[in-house]
Image (cartoon, rainbow, N blue to C red):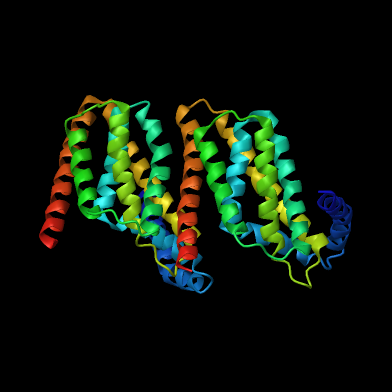
Amino acid sequence: MMTRLATSLDRSSWIMFALPWLFWPAMAMAHVGQGNVAGGFLAGVAHPVLGPDHVVAMVAVGIWGAQLGAPAIWVLPVTFPIVMAFGGVLGGLGVPIPGIEIGIAVSAIVLGGMIAFARRPPLWVAAVVVGVFAIFHGHAHGAELPESANAISYSVGFVAATGSLHALGILIGAANRWSAGAKVLRAGGGVIAACGIYFLTGHLVAV
Amino acid sequence: MPAARAGVAVCLLLAAGGAYAHSAARGAGDFYAGALHALTALEHVLPFVALGILAGQQGRKGQPVLLAFCLALAAGATVAIWTPPLPYVGLLNIFSGILFGALVAAAWSLPMVFCFGIAALFGLTHGFANGAGMIAQTRPYLFIPGVALAGLAVTAYALILTDYLLRRKAGWIHIAVRVAGSWIAAIGILVLATSGAAILRG
């Protein structure tokens, strides 16, 4: 009885999982005609999430914040979106910042290194490191804002996705409480720095 | 502004008529048109939410700020009956979202005069932008209360939720409220930049 119940539950949960995906294209299509609000939101969410260099650096910001503890852990999520938006303004207005993609790869290396060596610099140093990355990150996305998308829903999606990636990093960083977790985090920092080096070589070869 | 004040008084008098029309299930459509005009645009809803959170952060004395905002919305929409659409009011509305959001992120205890001042000022601009959506066939005495009550409802829900959250002991919940303001400010800055870029490009 129990196994039957379990399998039926399992099947229904699969169906429930599959249903939204079935309707997804239809939903998206239905809204695009109406001022592209949903399309703008999806584009805004997709933009930060689909760039692996951004994802890695953003999760790293969250993990490092958790490793640093108070007050960094609450200064970070409150100030990062506003600094990032400032970078987005520069990008949207077409103010050039040279070497954006290289800067993002370097910030992944620096943030990963900070986590791997468990560095705890003064708050203002951490703020500058994270702030530079925030401006690069915002600039890269602000410069690529699609003309057709609804600007507000795009920004909502963009900011929400960025904030959620931070939150993910902070949640992962909660493992810092346990000594084994702290070791795993530091190893993860090494992986993040390695990803940064990979992105960097990709850009250097491309240039 | 005696004219605006008289307008508000007239609207409040006629709002009873609006309710009567609703109960007769006839002609109340313009009330909902006004409410939906405000509720279906993120450029209004996001600043409304931020103002509600800001008022909630100020504690019990923040509640009358929302009434002032509601009256200012009605006054602004009333002014729009006689005034041609003004350019850049939309940008002011986006700016209000940045200001309210940044103040929520800062989590300061603000002087009440300042709170009433920004609520009244940006209530006028949001009300004006909504009032400009009326066409010749729209009945203002239904549309304007719709706008004002939609603004009151959104800000009041945000205030109630904020009040509930700030009573929790966990420190991260207080940070989460500030983060919400930071997000709204960031969204406003990005939108203002893109609108500004569009204006610069012509």
User: Which residue is at the front of the view, B52 or A177?
Assistant: B52
Provide residue B88's location: percent of width, then percent of height: 59, 59
Residue at horizontal 26%, vertical 41%? A60
Provide residue B10's location: percent of width, then percent of height: 88, 54
Provide residue A61's location: percent of width, then percent of height: 30, 39
Res A98 → quadrant: bottom left
Residue at horizontal 74%, vertical 42%? B68
Work out whether A192 lies above or below A100: above
Horizontal arrangement in the rendering, residue A107 relative to residue B200 (left or right):
left
Provide residue A169's location: percent of width, then percent of height: 31, 40
Q: How many marks?
A: 0
Residue at horizontal 56%, vertical 56%? B91
Res A176 → quadrant: top left
User: Which residue is at the front of the view, B70 or A142?
Assistant: A142
Question: Where is the C terminus of chain A found, in terms of image quarters?
Answer: bottom left
Horizontal arrangement in the rendering, residue B3 relative to residue A36 (left or right):
right
Horizontal arrangement in the rendering, residue A55 relative to residue A159 (left or right):
left
Residue A15 in view in this figure: no
Horizontal arrangement in the rendering, residue B154 relative to residue A12 (left or right):
right
Res B52 → quadrant: top right
Residue B58 in view in this figure: yes
Residue at horizontal 70%, vertical 41%? B66
